[in-house]
Image (spheres, rainbow, N blue to C red):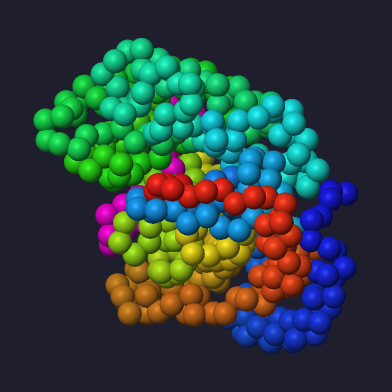
Amino acid sequence: MSETIISADLVGSHNAARKPDLERDYASLGERLDRRGIVIDAIRDKVEKFAVAIPSWGVGTGGTRFARFPGAGEPRDIFDKIEDCAVISQLTRATPTVSLHIPWDKADPNRLKQAASRFGLGFDAMNSNTFSDARDQKLSYKFGSLSHADAGTRRQAVEHNLECIEIGKTLGSKALTVWIGDGSNFPGQVNFAKAFERYLDAMREIYAGLPDDWRLFTEHKMYEPAFYSTVVQDWGTNYIIARELGDKAFCLVDLGHHAPNVNIEMIVSRLIQFGKLGGFHFNDSKYGDDDLDAGSIDPYRLFLVFNELVDAELSGARDFHPAHMLDQSHNVTDPIESLMLSAVEVQRAYAQALLVDRKALEGFQEENDALMATQTLKSAYRTDVEPILAMARLRTGGAVDPVAVYREAGYRAKVAAERPAIAGGGGGIV
Ligand SMILES: [Mn+2]
C-alpha cells in the first residue's frame, strides 16, 4: 500500500458527504445516456484507466519573459516535486506518473525511484534540456545545441541526451522527449538546410542509443526562443524527423506550439494515419505558447483532439498508444490546483469524445449533412460528464472534489512553513 500525503480520513469524510448527491447525478446521467444507447459504467471504466503524466517542472511557479513571482511553499528540489505530484495523484487518481527534466531534476536515480514508489508513482518520458546552459557546462547553447555550427557543442548536446536515457533506464522510463530551442533570430543568421542536416545527424546518434523498448519523441514549436526561424518548427518537419530516424521515433504535439487558429486536431489525425503520433503536451493558449491550464481557453478544441484519439482507438489504428502529459506554467494559481484541474479537463475531453455517436456521424458525413454531422459532435460535447469523472475518482480512492479537499487539508500552508521561498528575479517561463 503506498503512502498518502493528504489524510485518508479527510478524503473519506469529504467523499461521504458528497456521495448521495453524486449517486443521484450519476444515475440520472446514466438514464439519459442509456436512451442514447450508451452504458455509463463502460465510459466510467475507460475514464478510470485513463492517465496523464505530471511534468516535474509544472509543480513550481512559472514566470513570463518579464518576471517570476515565487509562490508559497514551492518545491526546493525534485524530492519536494515528487511529493507535490503525489498529492495530485492521490486526489485525482488520474496522474500516476511524473515526467522528469534533466538536469533540473538530477539526483541519484535509485533515490528518485524510491521516493516515487513510496507514493505509488512511476516515471513517464525523460526530458532533456539543451535550451539553456547548466552550471559548469563547457560549451554554451546560446547559438544552438543539436544543430549548432560547432561539432563539439553538438557532441555535448548528444551526450546529454544519452545521459538522460541512462538515467531513465534506472527509473523505468520508456521514452525520451527532445525539444530544442535551436533556430535563428535574423534572416541570414543560419543556413536552414545545413542546420537541419546537422540536427538530423545528431538525432541519429541519440536514436542509436535508445533501448529497443523505448520511444523517442520530438517536439515541434513554431517560434520562441528563436523569433525568425526554428529548426523543428512544425508538424511537417517533425514528421520528416520521425520518418528519417526510424520506427521508434514519433512526433509529440504540444497544443501551445502552433500558430493561432491552426487546426491541431487535423494534425493529430494526419500523424495517427501515418503511425507517427507519439503523444501530447496538454495546455491551452489564447495567443502564443501561453502554457495555460488545459481546457481553460478552448475546451472545444481539446474535445476535438480527443475526438480524433477516440476515433483512432476504436478503429484500431496502427502504432497507436500516445503518451499523455501536461505541460503548463502557472503564474497566478497554485500549481497543484491547476494541475489537478487540468488532469480532470483532459479526462473530461476523453469522456465526452467517448460519447460521440460514431455510426451516426459516419452516416451524416457520407450524406454530406454538414449540419447534423457537426451537431453529432456538439451533442457529445454538451453532455455534462462530471458525474462520470467524480464517480471514477470516488471508486479509485481519489476525491470527489479534489480542490475542496486540497484546500481544507491546508497542504500549501504546511509546505510553505517547511520550504523557504525561492527568490524570483528575472523571467523564467517553464
Ligand atoms: Mn511542451
Name the side, left or right, on which 226 lies relative to 308: left
x, y percent for residue 427: 39, 48
Question: Magenta stretch?
Answer: 246-264
Camera-side residue: 109 or 165?
109
For the residue pair 224 and 74, the one nearer the viewer reads as: 74
The x and y percentages for residue 398 are 75, 64
Position above or below: 149 against 363: above
- Please tell me whether the stretch drawn in magenta is mainly helix, strand or loop: loop
**Which of the 4 quarters of the picture holds residue 337?**
bottom right
**Residue at point 46% right, 68% down?**
296
Q: Quadrant of residue 191?
A: top left
Magenta span contains residue 261: yes
Position of 380 with respect to 56 (left or right) is left
Residue at 55% in and 21% down: 163
- Tell me: residue 324, above or below residue 376: above
Q: Residue 105: horizontal and vertical position, in percent?
A: 59, 35
